[in-house]
């Protein structure tokens, strides 16, 4: 009688092991299937993305008009020829490394966008008095850049990623002559175009 009892006990242990193995396999595989089948949530509201993309296009258009006017009026048509002068004048470029497709980071990208817009807002303010013919275009461009910076800041606050204190503008360049101011205008607006192009691509990526 002892032998059948031992065989039954071994069968019971074997069944328990099989049951535990099946449960372990289910625990390991089910979350993987569920995670892959659920799409990731959109990190930014669609309304914010649409508004931001429209603001970028609006600023790009006005910035291009200002570049064309500087070219037509003062024959300053090639920003690359003014690069060395830009270094001496202190015309900076705003970085957007956190918004590149290789290293796209939502929090850092929004902060760089906002900081960059503040920088270009200050540069545009420094160009005040560049020319009576360009004053209206310059004022409208500055207003649009300010509005875009406000849009980015409000979204940062909504996401809870805004700094405790809103950043302030850095020290802006001063120009010793009318030519320096016009050359600074060409460089600032050219840098702004590059900045907006990267911003647009990043926003489009967030919208996908």
Image (cartoon, helix red, strand yellow):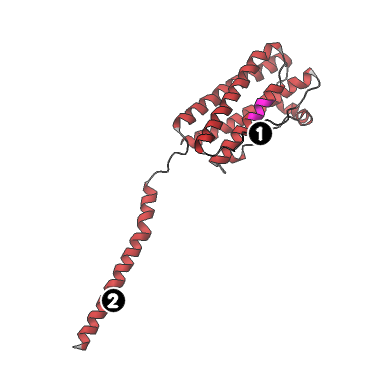
Secondary structure predominantly adopted by residues drawn in magenta: helix
Which residue corresponds to mark 2? 13
Picture layout, residue 191 above or below residue 38: above
Please say whether residue 119 is one of the residues in the magenta stretch. Answer: yes
Residue 58, by quadrant, is: top right
Name the spot of residue 202 as percent of width and height, x first: 54, 35
Query: Which residue is more in the foreground, 69 or 13?
Result: 13
User: Of the numbered discs in the image, which one, if any, rests on residue 120?
Assistant: none
Looking at the image, which residue is at 75% across and 21% down?
181
Query: Which residue is more in the foreground, 16 or 192?
Result: 16
Q: Is residue 100 visible?
A: no
Looking at the image, which residue is at 68% across and 26% down?
122
Query: Which residue is more in the foreground, 143 or 40?
Result: 143
Looking at the image, which residue is at 52% across and 33% down?
155
Badge 2 vs badge 1, beta-carbon distance below 8 Å: no
Looking at the image, which residue is at 68% across and 11% down?
133
Q: Earlier in the sequence, mark 2 or mark 1?
A: 2
User: Of the numbered discs in the image, which one, if any, rests on residue 94?
Assistant: 1
Q: Is residue 178 left or right of residue 97?
A: right
Residue 161, by quadrant, is: top right
Q: Which residues are magenta?
A: 118-122
Picture layout, residue 117 above or below residue 102: above
């Amino acid at each position: 009688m002892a032998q059948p009892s031992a065989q039954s006990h071994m069968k019971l242990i074997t069944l328990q092991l099989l049951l535990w193995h099946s449960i372990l396999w289910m625990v390991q595989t089910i979350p993987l299937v569920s995670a892959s089948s659920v799409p990731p949530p959109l990190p930014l509201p669609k309304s914010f993305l649409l508004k931001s993309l429209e603001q970028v296009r609006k600023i790009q258009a006005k910035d291009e008009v200002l570049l064309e006017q500087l070219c037509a009026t003062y024959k300053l048509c090639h920003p690359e020829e003014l690069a060395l002068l830009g270094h001496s004048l202190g015309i900076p470029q705003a970085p957007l490394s956190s918004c590149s497709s290789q290293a796209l980071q939502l929090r850092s990208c929004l902060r760089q966008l906002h900081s960059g817009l503040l920088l270009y807002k200050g540069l545009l303010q420094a160009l005040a008095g560049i020319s009576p013919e360009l004053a209206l275009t310059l004022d409208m461009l500055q207003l649009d850049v300010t509005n875009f910076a406000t849009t980015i800041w409000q979204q940062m606050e909504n996401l809870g990623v805004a700094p405790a204190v809103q950043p302030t503008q850095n020290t802006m360049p001063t120009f010793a002559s009318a030519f320096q101011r016009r050359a600074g205008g060409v460089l600032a607006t050219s840098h702004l175009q590059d900045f907006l192009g990267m911003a647009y691509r990043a926003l489009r990526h967030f919208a996908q």
